[in-house]
Image: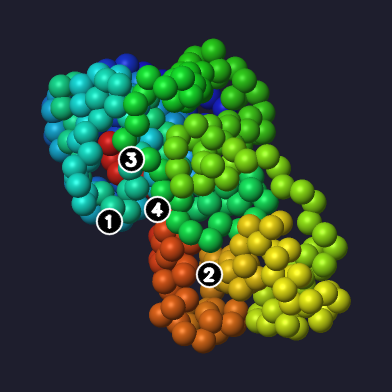
Amino acid sequence: MYASTTRKQIIIRSNDISCDDFGALFSNLFGNLYADSPPPPKNIIIGGVYGRHEGVSFRRMHYRGDFTVDFPAPLDEITFVIPTAGKIIFNHVTESVGFAQIGLAIDKAEVRSARFVDNHAQHGISISRRLITERLSTLLGKPILQKVHFEPVVDLRASALQGIRALIELATGSEFDLLINSGSLMPSRLREMLVDAVLETWPHNFTEALRRPSPLIAPRHVKLAVEYIQAHPDHLASGTELAQLTHVSLRALQEGFQRFMGTSIVAYQRQVRLERAFAALSQGAAPSVTDVALQYGFSNVGRFCQYFQSAYGISPADVRKGVRTRPMGSTML
């Protein structure tokens, strides 16, 4: 067993070793990230390749023996599992079973346990929901106003999904080590490739939007309104006020937002304020959730929390406490 040597190591490689030894190897590289998760039984053998970098992990793993892992707390990540042997069973609202040609997208905030059966092996990617939302917003050129939902069960024989498997094999192959270790830029480039591959190939509720042709360039009055909203997130300007500022009728501005921004003026303002609230709560010395809500124009704190949870898949209180940075469970999923 060995770990790659680089300025900042991000990959573990191991032959078949005990789960305790693998855990020690993992902790040595990434720190004791799984203190709250009970370990697998000591007779379980783990092997493969596991990589992790700033909110994204990728793996090609196998597990010798059947066992169950309990997840003690919700986690702000989505796991994409491509089984290559045996089965994996997630228990949440309904049971999800992955095997052979059946892949799974699992929201870890909804999962309570996972069972590994018949010497399960897998390729997989896990991504912070925050990263998924931010990248999707960048690709679409507009705020994301609802939670991203991936198709929970997919047929892995689809060519696009086979492409994800090929990308994971590239990332976990020993030939890639020379490139990943050659400098500080490649890990971030790989992370972006993995996120983009999932967004572009694994079906979700924004898939059609991503496949549409690029929108026309927004007219000047829409750009001016957007710039004003971005520059004054703490001021909830009315549609009439924005129309006056941009020298068009309210109806023209409303139609411009729907056509070029894909949303209403009110919804766009809300998302901008949510984005600023997220940034404020992410700071180490952030004020209270109530203070942040009021600062960005949300007079109803309960409603603010609902909007926030829907947009980011995590509560504002958890973001303030840094929960969003918590990793996934001890099975390296």
Q: Earlier in the sequence, mark 2 or mark 3?
A: 3
The residue at which mark 2 appears reads as 281
In the rendering, at what x and y percent does residue 206 appear?
Answer: 51, 46
Of labels 4 and 2, earlier in sequence is 4
In the rendering, at what x and y percent does residue 34 appear? 31, 46
Q: Residues within 10 Å of mark 3 (few under 14, many from 20)?
A: some
- Which amino acid is tagged 4? Asp
Relative image position of residue 109 (x, y in whole percent): 32, 53
Disc 3 target residue: 152
- Dot 2 amino acid type: Leu
Label 4 and label 3: CA atoms lie apart by 16 Å
Whether residue 320 is visible to the viewer of this picture, yes or no, is no
| Direction top: furthest residue | 175
Query: The C terminus lies in which quarter of the figure?
Result: top left
Q: Earlier in the sequence, mark 1 or mark 3?
A: 1
Write down the residue under mark 1: 73
Q: CA distance from mark 4 to mark 1?
A: 10 Å
Q: Which mark is residue 76?
A: 4
Badge 3 marks a residue whose secondary structure is loop
Residues marked 2 and 1 touching at CB (< 8 Å): no
Q: Is residue 84 above or below residue 25?
A: above
Numbered disc in front, either 4 or 3:
3
The local crowd at label 4, few if under 14, some if 14 to 19, many if 20 or more residues have their Cα within 10 Å, is: many
Q: Residue 178's spot in the image, x, y percent? A: 60, 17
Pair 2/3: label in front: 3
Query: Judging from the image, what secondary structure is the residue with disc 2 in?
Result: helix
